Amino acid sequence: MIFSGLFLSLSQAQPAPRGGGISLHFFIMMGLVFLVFYLLLIRPQRTRQKKHQEMVENLKPGDKVITSGGIHGTVMGVQKDKLELKIASNVKIDIAKTSIAVILTPQKKEK
């Protein structure tokens, strides 16, 4: 008796309407999502990355810096992809240029 009521209600159910495919609204919404994502995340990160790259390229011996690991030191030598950093008297280490977080020595603007 219970099963017959279930089968009866299932047989009277309306078929679900079929989707007509992906509409133009979907593409517009995805475009807007990408635009917001680009403006809020990608563009500012690229700007920071370019500024950091410029800062690292302008390093010269004598600049006081802080690494991303928190090591304070003075630049003693600059090579293509690494720096020689003096962190104490008679203690020098080689680090990657990309690990520089802050330059403490004020940079002079070139005209």
Image (tube, rainbow, N blue to C red):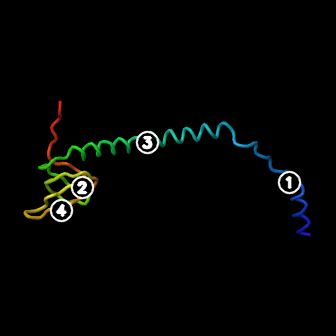
Residue 25 falls in which quadrant of the image? top right
What amino acid is labelled 4 in the image?
Ile
Q: Residue 90 location, x and y as percent? A: 8, 64
**7 or 98: nearer the eye?**
98
Q: What residue would you read off at disc 1?
A: 13
Sequence-wise, the earlier of marks 2 and 4 is: 2
Sequence-wise, the earlier of marks 1 and 2 is: 1
Q: CA distance from mark 2 to mark 4?
A: 10 Å
Name which residue lies at 86% across and 54% down: 13
Mark in the foreground, 3 or 2: 2
Position of the N terminus, as image quadrant, is bottom right
Q: Which mark is residue 40?
A: 3
Q: CA distance from mark 3 to mark 2?
A: 32 Å
Sequence-wise, the earlier of marks 4 and 3 is: 3
Under circle 1, the secondary element is loop
Q: What residue would you read off at disc 4?
A: 93
Q: Residue 50 location, x and y as percent? A: 32, 42
Name which residue lies at 29% across and 42% down: 51
Residue 28 placement, left or right of 8 = left
Position of the C terminus, as image quadrant, is top left
Under circle 2, the secondary element is strand
- Height in image: 7 above or below 45? below
Q: What residue would you read off at disc 2?
A: 82
Residue 48 placement, left or right of 7 = left
Q: Residue 58 location, x and y as percent? A: 21, 43
Under circle 3, the secondary element is helix
